[in-house]
Image (tube, rainbow, N blue to C red):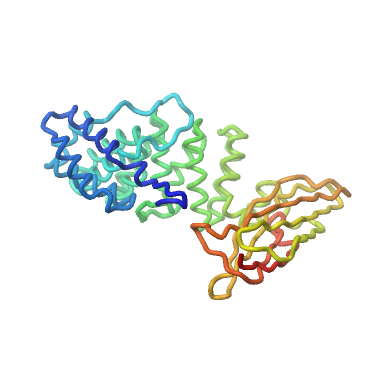
């Protein structure tokens, strides 16, 4: 994973300095641990692997240094852990990525014979680095047992452990192993966690609901309505969670999601879009102006959709945020947007040809325009 400036995330997270740090922790925990041998083993092939593979490789090397069943190695692993992340914060990042291989080590050694001990260790390690990936093999092997443990974790003193409950059970966790849970199985846990007082947890709850919207929008919307009725979460925080949970549906123009956020998908609006100029070169800036009118005050959520030409001549779309506002009666809302059409983007290529811009207001496409994209 490197960007066009040569930055390497895998090298930032897993490098000689980080490996030496991890080796030192285990050396201090058990003098029998061969710290120099561990470092040499890891570094011999670390550069050969991508980020996720490096986690597995470090776990491989750790297994060589800590052979035997998990009950024998668990005391050393626990003793090697540094102090937990600051428990007084309300938000935080994952922790230090160098502890991700410990979760892989525990998942391998804990299944199938030492599930309870493995979960104990996962609960300890996640207070140093999020174990959302490592918990998923346990969920697939022993879902009832793990979900029962998560009932306890949902009320844990550490918000890192509480977050593991919702993040670890996400239906579409990035980089994570797929889990065989039904969409509704973790909902009772989310009912507890949606009222959490830490943004780190509530963001995860919202992300979990956003995952659910990809398969069952009504399930997510019904849960948000129930939480609004219960009134146990601060209203501002619940409003934020609702917006974050529905972001995918909002981009898709889902009418019920729009209405839940206070935007009428059937609002009577007069909309127009103009593109200047009508020809744009790859690497330069597309500029367009739009105008929205209403006979009465109307809350609007304005997005724009760019339809990009593909290599085969077809089109694909991408939705971008533009503005949330209130259009005043008889007072047009005028917006201008400049969008750079980068020719060196790492995610996709641009191809010359006729392109389209659509103005989406409250989930409905209300106006559109075209422009020619030219080679530089």
- Residue at image location 38% in from the left, 38% down from the top: 151
Residue 212 % position (x, y): 49, 53
Q: Which quarter of the figure has residue 288?
A: bottom right
Q: Is residue 306 depicted above or below 159 in this figure?
A: below
Q: Is residue 87 depicted above or below 169 in this figure?
A: above
- Residue at image location 57% in from the left, 43% down from the top: 226
Q: Is residue 29 left or right of residue 176?
A: left
- Towards the viewer: 340 or 270: 340
Residue 127 % position (x, y): 35, 32
- Towards the viewer: 203 or 85: 85
Q: Is residue 152 depicted above or below 346 in this figure?
A: above
Q: Is residue 110 left or right of residue 255?
A: left
Q: Please identify the quadrant where the C terminus is shown.
A: bottom right
Q: Is residue 368 left or right of residue 233?
A: right
- Residue at image location 48% in from the left, 29% down from the top: 90
Residue 271 % position (x, y): 79, 58
Q: Is residue 288 depicted above or below 29 in this figure?
A: below
Residue 15 % position (x, y): 30, 41
Task: Determine the residue located farthest toward the right in the rendered image.
Answer: 330
- Towards the viewer: 136 or 312: 312
């Amino acid at each position: 994973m490197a960007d066009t400036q040569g930055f390497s995330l895998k090298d930032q997270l897993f490098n000689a300095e980080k490996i030496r740090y991890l080796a030192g922790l285990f050396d201090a925990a058990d003098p029998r641990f061969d710290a120099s041998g561990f470092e040499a083993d890891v570094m011999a092939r670390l550069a050969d692997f991508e980020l996720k593979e490096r986690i597995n490789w470090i776990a491989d090397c750790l297994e060589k240094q800590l052979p035997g069943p998990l009950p024998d190695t668990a005391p050393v692993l626990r003793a090697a852990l540094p102090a937990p992340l600051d428990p007084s914060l309300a938000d935080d990042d994952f922790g230090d990525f160098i502890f991700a291989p410990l979760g892989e080590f525990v998942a391998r050694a804990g299944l199938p014979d030492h599930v309870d001990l493995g979960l104990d260790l996962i609960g300890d390690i996640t207070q140093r680095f999020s174990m959302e990936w490592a918990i998923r093999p346990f969920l697939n092997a022993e879902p009832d047992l793990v979900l029962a443990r998560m009932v306890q974790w949902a009320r844990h003193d550490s918000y890192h452990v509480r977050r593991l409950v919702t993040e670890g059970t996400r239906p579409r966790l990035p980089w994570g192993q797929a889990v065989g849970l039904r969409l509704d199985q973790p909902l009772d846990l989310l009912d507890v966690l949606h009222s959490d007082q830490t943004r780190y947890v509530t963001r995860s709850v919202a992300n979990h609901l956003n995952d659910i919207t990809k398969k069952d929008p009504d399930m997510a919307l019904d849960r948000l309505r129930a939480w609004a009725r219960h009134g146990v979460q601060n209203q501002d925080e619940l409003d934020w969670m609702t917006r974050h949970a529905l972001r995918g549906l909002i981009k898709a123009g889902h009418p019920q999601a729009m209405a839940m956020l206070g935007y009428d998908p059937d609002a009577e609006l007069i909309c127009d879009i103009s593109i200047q100029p009508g020809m744009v070169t790859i690497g330069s800036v597309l500029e367009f102006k739009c105008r929205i009118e209403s006979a009465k005050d109307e809350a609007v959520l304005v997005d724009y959709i760019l339809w990009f030409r593909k290599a085969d001549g077809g089109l694909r779309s991408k939705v971008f945020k533009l503005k949330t506002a209130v259009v005043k009666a008889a007072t047009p809302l005028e917006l201008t947007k400049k969008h750079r059409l980068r020719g060196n983007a790492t995610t996709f290529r641009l191809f010359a040809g006729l392109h389209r811009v659509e103005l989406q207001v409250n989930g409905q496409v209300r106006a559109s325009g075209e422009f020619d994209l030219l080679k530089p």
